Image (spheres, grey):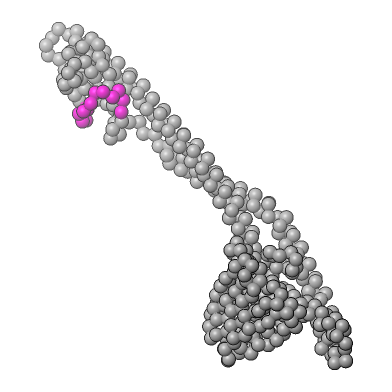
């Protein structure tokens, strides 16, 4: 899966899930408060019914002429009565009620209902009804529903993302097939062109013919370099490679010499600061791909009549050009396969993808410092 695909999937999932979760949270919060209101309403209605039962009993006792009477008790609820000064007359409550100003409240899983009495039966001006709060376990149901909705949302979003990415994948597949076919067809003509160029005698050529020959050779080298990149890209996981101790000082000098003719066409100079006999354990073909891609990019994107600086130490390799430079956004996405920022220069946009894959394989850290219209410095550290 390409990095751009992963980024698209992540962005779609983030937007889709965040909006869905926000909607779920809003709906569930509204539902939660609605259930709370319903609970309070139901509790109040039950307590009102109990208060009528108590009031009937108090009326019966009030009308009883005997002096000995027993305060009424009920199985379903507890009660208390207070006088006009809000002083307790009698109570069967589990705990005292400190204030009679609130009509209804819930405390410690108990529901309380307070209402005035008229006329004052047995001297009572207020009655308090207490009952166990009816448990309503809807929170666990909400959580279960939320989990199911989130899972459905995730699967739906993944399906939608795959549906959206399908045309992109098909286009990338077509591009891969095109590159494979192109590489196969380029093999014989490139080999033939390069072999014949090396056998040509240019000693007796006039200046105009020599310039034409140089252009042909530069074009051939560009095609050859692109061909080597395509071969690496297609056969990276199939071809056999041999890691060994490489004298990268010599290899770097050879690759700079290889690209000199291309550099001369833009009147570029090389400032070489190469430490002798620097050794690195790697496959030679891969390390040459690494150097070639950085060098060719420096030559391709630098300005005419400037200098490319190459520094090599025992643990670092850096190449600095004086070209157009890159923005930070371009640097962040430069390793994506088929990523191009300049349509004028052409190419498939695979150079830095190859650089990244080789660097990762050999645990080489890549640092890119760039400034618009001043140039780019690529540093490899190991």
Quarter of the figure with residue 198: bottom right
As displayed, is residue 17 above or below residue 53? below
For the record, the magenta segment spans: 93-105
Query: For residue 100: magenta?
Result: yes
Residue occupying the point 68% across, 55% down:
165
151 left or right, relative to 220: left
Quarter of the figure with residue 177: bottom right
Question: As rendered, which of 221 and 79 lies closer to the eye?
Answer: 221
Q: In the rendered image, which quarter contains the N terminus?
A: bottom right
Quarter of the figure with residue 320: bottom right
- From the top left corner, tell me how far across and down residue 77 is, in percent: 27, 25
List the single residue furthest toward the left.
67
193 left or right, relative to 297: right
Question: As rendered, which of 89 and 185 lies closer to the eye?
Answer: 185
176 left or right, relative to 33: right
List the single residue furthest toward the front.
305
- From the top left corner, tell me how far across and down residue 133 is, in percent: 32, 31
Asked if one can make out residue 24 in the rendered structure from this viewpoint, the answer is yes
Query: How many labels were placed on the picture?
Result: 0
User: Does the magenta stretch mainly form a helix, a strand or a loop?
Assistant: loop
- From the top left corner, tell me how far across and down residue 346 is, in percent: 75, 68
């Amino acid at each position: 899966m390409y990095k751009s695909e992963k980024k698209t999937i992540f962005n779609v999932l983030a937007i889709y899930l965040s909006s869905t979760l926000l909607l779920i949270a809003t709906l569930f919060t509204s539902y939660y408060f609605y259930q709370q209101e319903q609970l309070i309403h139901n509790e109040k209605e039950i307590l009102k019914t109990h208060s009528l039962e108590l009031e009937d009993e108090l009326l019966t006792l009030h009308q009883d002429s005997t002096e000995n009477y027993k305060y009424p008790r009920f199985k379903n609820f507890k009660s208390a009565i207070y006088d006009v000064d809000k002083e307790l007359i009698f109570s069967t409550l589990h705990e005292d009620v400190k204030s009679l100003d609130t009509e209804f409240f819930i405390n410690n899983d108990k529901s309380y209902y307070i209402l005035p009495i008229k006329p004052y039966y047995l001297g009572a001006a207020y009655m308090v009804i207490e009952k166990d709060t009816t448990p309503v376990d809807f929170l666990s149901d909400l959580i279960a529903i939320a989990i199911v909705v989130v899972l459905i949302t995730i699967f739906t979003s993944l399906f939608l993302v795959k549906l959206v990415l399908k045309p992109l994948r098909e286009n990338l597949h077509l591009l891969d097939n095109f590159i494979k076919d192109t590489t196969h067809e380029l093999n014989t003509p490139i080999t033939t062109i390069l072999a014949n160029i090396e056998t040509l005698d240019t000693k007796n050529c006039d200046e105009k013919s020599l310039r034409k020959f140089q252009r042909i050779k530069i074009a051939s080298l560009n095609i050859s370099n692109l061909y080597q990149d395509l071969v690496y890209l297609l056969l990276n996981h199939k071809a056999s490679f041999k890691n060994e101790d490489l004298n990268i000082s010599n290899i770097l000098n050879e690759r700079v010499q290889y690209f000199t003719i291309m550099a001369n066409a833009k009147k570029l100079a090389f400032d070489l600061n190469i430490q002798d006999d620097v050794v690195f354990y790697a496959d030679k073909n891969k390390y040459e791909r690494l150097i070639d891609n950085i060098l060719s990019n420096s030559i391709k994107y630098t300005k005419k009549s400037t200098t490319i600086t190459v520094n090599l130490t025992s643990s670092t390799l850096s190449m600095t050009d004086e070209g157009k430079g890159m923005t930070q956004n371009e640097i962040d996405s430069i390793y994506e396969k088929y990523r191009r920022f300049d349509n004028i220069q052409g190419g498939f946009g695979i150079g830095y993808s190859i650089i990244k894959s080789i660097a990762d394989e050999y645990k080489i850290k890549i640092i890119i410092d760039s400034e618009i219209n001043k140039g780019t410095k690529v540093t490899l550290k190991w």
